[in-house]
Image: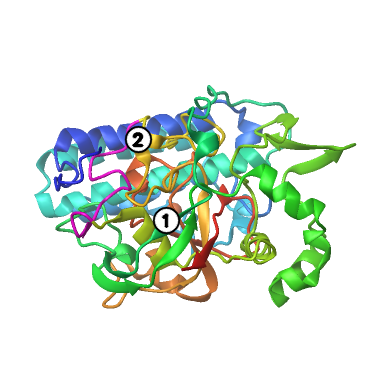
Amino acid sequence: MTDHTLTRPPSDDVDDLVEALAAARRRTRALTDCLPDDELTAQHSPLMSPLVWDLAHTGNQEEIWLVRTAGGRPALRPELDAHYDAFRHPRADRPSLPLLAPDPARRYLAQVRAQALDVLATAPSEARFLFRMIAQHEQQHDETMLATHQLRRGPAVLAAPNPPAAPADAATLPREVLVPGGPFTMGTDLATDPDALDNERPAHRVDVPAFWLDTVPVTNAAYQEFIADGGYRQARWWHPDGWLHRRRAELTAPAFWHRDGDTWLRRRFGHVEPVPPNEPVLHVSWYEADAYARWAGRRLPTEAEWEKAARHDPAAGRSRRHPWGDAPPTPDHANLGQRHLRPAPAGSYPAGAAPCGARQLLGDVWEWTATDFTGHPGFAAHPYREYSEVFFGSEYKVLRGGSFGTGPVACRSTFRNWDFPVRRQIFAGFRTARSA
Ligand SMILES: [Fe+2]
């Protein structure tokens, strides 16, 4: 059993914040030092920024929030603000900006980091939220940069060991688990979780009727049955907008898949390989996930259902920070942090199971939910409106749980991600549900 009685919040220790910032920077360097300058300044897809934009943008945000806001210090490079403002320039336009070249960008990041650490040494504890936010921000860009690597054509430059093989009991797991009905605490507060970003707050009670949830994410093998059964050719399984999009974009399989005779192959960070049957399906849009669920006679879980499955502990009558308890993730709990560059086989990580028995809710693949992205009741933007509030509405669907590409500091059972229902370059899969 895991430590479901533990209520210790994440450490607010300065050394831990320094390490969180350093861990993000190690990943940033691993994702950018492996490519020559012309590949860092190239745009590998109109969906993504040049990698050198992400690089200097993380430094610019760190300067704005840690050096200027937390430290009250003068701006180091105020002339950069306009070029690295994500709201001023859509990704497709960023290659035409007068961006810092890779080496000057690296020097800028180092200069900002030195000042930020200096500020942290004397910052009052109220300012530490900004350091937590910036460590998460850089990890979020590390995942974005990993998606750029996936879209990049050319020989592989990233390497990582494979995840461990599926545990012995994976084949015997029940297909679905029951999540009992009743209220639970959704969302959180800074007093409980000092990492929580504005859209995760405040904590509030939500009554969720009993439902059944897939024990593990939908696998490639299951998804291939949908394809083989003509799932992509039958409008009846698709949301009307999804069907229009499927036809216009000529979708016939997940992104990065192609067929060689009877075999499905995929391209993964420059490697072409057979699609592994027992791995969670990856690179499907919300529309594809929704169509699969209908074809299977099921539906996508709502966001509240997903969160209840991931953190409600019926024995203790409280919500956990993670499915296994409040303790930070270890490599035994979940596939996070780009330790592996693929999802682990379905049924992995028994030590990371939720009280309901579902596995792999955190890590491996982001999971599409049925729910549009809006604020929790009582939402207040903090520290700036543009983090999440400007995205609220029916255009975006919520994804939960993080992927193998998500840094552990940016992953917990309350963390919310959102994207357009057509998006496929993100590391997203799904699981299905049905009402009890
Ligand atoms: Fe950003």
* Amino acid at pointer 1: Asp
Residue 79 visible in the shown view: yes
- Give x and y (percent) for residue 153: 73, 36
| Most foreground residue, 18 or 217 | 217
Tell me which residue sits at (82%, 58%) in the image.
230
Residue 329 sits inside the magenta stretch: yes
Examine the structure image and report whether residue 170 is included in the region drawn in magenta. no
In the rendered image, the quadrant that contains the N terminus is top left
> Dot 2, how many residues are within 10 Å of its Cα: few (below 14), some (14-19), or many (20+)?
some
The reply to whether discs 2 and 1 touch (Cβ–Cβ < 8 Å) is no
Along the viewing direction, whichever of 276 and 101 lies nearer the viewer:
276
| Label 2 or label 1, whichever comes before in sequence order | 1
Segment tinted magenta in the rendering: 315-330
Picture quadrant where residue 38 is located? top right
Disc assigned to residue 351:
2
Residue 197, percent across and down?
Answer: 30, 59
Determine the residue positioned at 34% across, 66% down: 199
At 70% across and 64% down in the image, what residue appears?
295
Element on which disc 1 rests: loop
Let me know if residue 71 appears in the view.
no
Residue 50 position by quadrant: top right
> Which residue is under mark 1?
81
Q: Going 38% across and 34% down the picture, which residue do you hit?
A: 25
Q: Helix, strand, or loop for circle 2?
A: helix
